[in-house]
Amino acid sequence: MMTKFQVACKNLMRKKTRSFLTLMGIALSAWVLVSLLGFNQGFEAALDRDIDNMGFQMMLMAKGCPYEAATMMLKGGTGLKYLPQSVAQDVLKEPEVEAITPMLMQTVFDPDKGENGGIAAYLGVDPASYGAMKTYLKFRQGGWFGQGDALEAVMGYEAAELEQREAGDLIFIPEKNLELRVVGVLERSGTQDDGTIFVPLRTLQRTFGRQGELTTIGIKVRKDADPGRIEEKLYELPDVQVVSLAQVKQTVMSLVSTAKALVLSIAIIAIVIAMVGVINTILMSVHERFQEIGILKTIGAMPGDIFQLIWMETLLLCAAGGMVGLGLSLILSRVTEWLVRSVLPFAPRGALVRIDLDLMLLSLGAISVIGLLSGLYPAWKAGRIRPLEAIRSEVGG
Amino acid sequence: MSANGAALQARGLSKHYRRGSEEIAAVSDVTLRILKGEFVAITGPSGSGKTTLVHLLGCLDNPTAGELSLGDRPVFGGEGKRLSERRLTQIRRETFGYIFQNFYLLPTLSVFENLVLPLTFHRKQGARKDPMGLLKQLGLDHRRDHLPGMLSGGEMQRVAIARALVNAPDILLADEPTGNLDSKRSAEIVGILKSLSREAGVTVIMVTHNLELASEADRRFEMRDGMVL
């Protein structure tokens, strides 16, 4: 026997092109919706991961713009300000501070970098304290430098790949005419360390004439400590600013909120257009089948049966479109990621668009609810068709 | 059906329309009684009200006045009270099967799917358990999986008859069932309706303007200006 589901499927197959176009409209809006929701959860997770991988929860730096500070911390930027190295000892005196690591970031113009030259950045670190905080850093070759003032360097995975260097090779610091021996190459960590060239802190201070100066102090606080109170105490030090990771996250999130609002607006518009398309398609179909629906009533269909039939057609279109959209969002997730990265002012490393089963089910549910809502009016209208009106449109007598 | 054998009784059945300030009496004061298993024809020229009458008898529309009983069950009684579309559908699907001039088969469904379509919405007690048997009976078993577009007019009308019979109706209403067929196919369809009445005991009410075909019926009601003569 025939079920209403089978009748609904056959009805949709009657105008294949129209059904296909409507389905694709829904699929595209589902793609946008899934990608947006995937971006919402992926971006925050990637940012959290980047921040967690820093190994410290606070950074101390010379007073200046917090946006610059955040950028430098996450990306390694320019516009550097300095604070005296003696501050490190003052910070360490705080009982709630578990460990610190002093850092000096320096940049030079490297004419051999890329086609037109580029900025080469070096991070001066103390291997003992830096390595202890970043326990996830593993060496692919070699290890940390031996002496605090050795003419040696450790290269992050991507930096080594870019420069084509291995342990034992030499690298040259332009402008300073200094050669450093690469003593270690790190494995890929998925953090900003991958693109960093590490140099012993004292070597970098001496090379750039910045003895006794730092750009940043990374601070690891004790687990039971109150970060807010420590922040207040650190602000008592002269000419420093404290950047907490929560602050950094907030700053970055506010930078991308505009982009997120834009994408959300596009998604909502796409969904509204798809809804209107669905309503239009089903209404046209009801109009074209006016007589047929009337005849169904003469052969025993109640208004509720017709309502269900038309509603089912709408739901089928939306569910099928939703599933195609989910497939598209999975297949094209790299394209989506590339598009999103191109419009964002800052993007953390790792996957920005994270699509998991929960998200897929949620999106499919949302599209189905939209389908059910879109189908209400056409289904109600079809349920009200009187068989007599359908028959009268043909015969007289 | 009732003990006196009446499948359907109408008394003073009327249907009036208003068109602007003018009142049009499509059906006026029709009284008739049709017996169970009877094959009747309603004839008359165009505009005589035969189709409107068959719509009232078939509970497709509410009368303006008059009474209608199906067996001994009153459906429309006295003046004024209109039945809802839902109630009319309930009555229709328990009692009637309909055949129309234009067949109204669903083009995307096969012959067999069209045949069993009424069972998707309602399976009446006593409905045919072997729909294929109906197709065989009407000589359409070889067309089971064909789409309506592949059939001749006569075959399409036979599928429509099979569809109307699948829920074992008490009364079969055929509104100009041969209107789109040549004379040979028309005679064939009327022959089927006649045998349904004779052999299966189905009450058949056929609207036609073809007097030759109407003569095959047990009785004929002639209509003119909304009244049965």
Image (cartoon, helix red, strand yellow):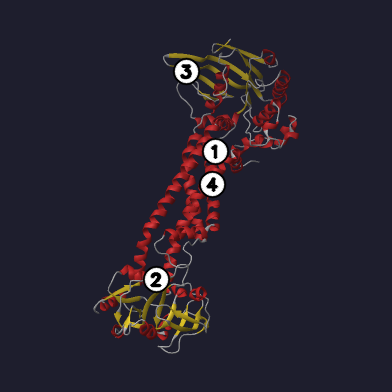
What's the chain of the residue with tag 4?
A
The residue that appears at 36% across and 69% down in the rendered structure is: A71
The circle drawn on residue A74 is 2
Residue A67 visible in the current orientation: yes
Disc 4 marks a residue whose amino acid type is Met
Disc 2 marks a residue whose amino acid type is Leu
The circle drawn on residue A56 is none
**Residue A51 lies in what quarter of the image?**
bottom left
Q: Earlier in the sequence, mark 1 or mark 2?
A: 2
Q: Residue A348: horizontal and vertical position, in percent?
A: 43, 67
The circle drawn on residue B17 is 3
Asked if residue A8 lies left or right of residue A102, the reply is right
Disc 1 marks a residue whose amino acid type is Asp
The residue that appears at 37% across and 80% down in the rendered structure is: A103
| Labels 4 and 3 positioned on one and the same chain | no
Quarter of the image with the N terminus of chain A in it:
top right
Cα separation, mark 2 vs mark 4, equals 40 Å
Cα separation, mark 1 vs mark 2, equals 60 Å
Residue designated by label 4: A24
Cα separation, mark 1 vs mark 4, equals 28 Å
Q: Tag 3, which secondary structure? A: strand
User: Is the residue under label 4 in contact with that under label 1 (CB below 8 Å)?
Assistant: no
Camera-side mark, 3 or 2: 2
Asked if residue A225 lies left or right of residue B119, the reply is left
Q: Residue A161: horizontal and vertical position, in percent?
A: 52, 74
Q: Earlier in the sequence, mark 2 or mark 4?
A: 4
Camera-side mark, 4 or 3: 4
Disc 3 marks a residue whose amino acid type is Tyr
User: Is the residue under label 2 in contact with that under label 3 (CB below 8 Å)?
Assistant: no
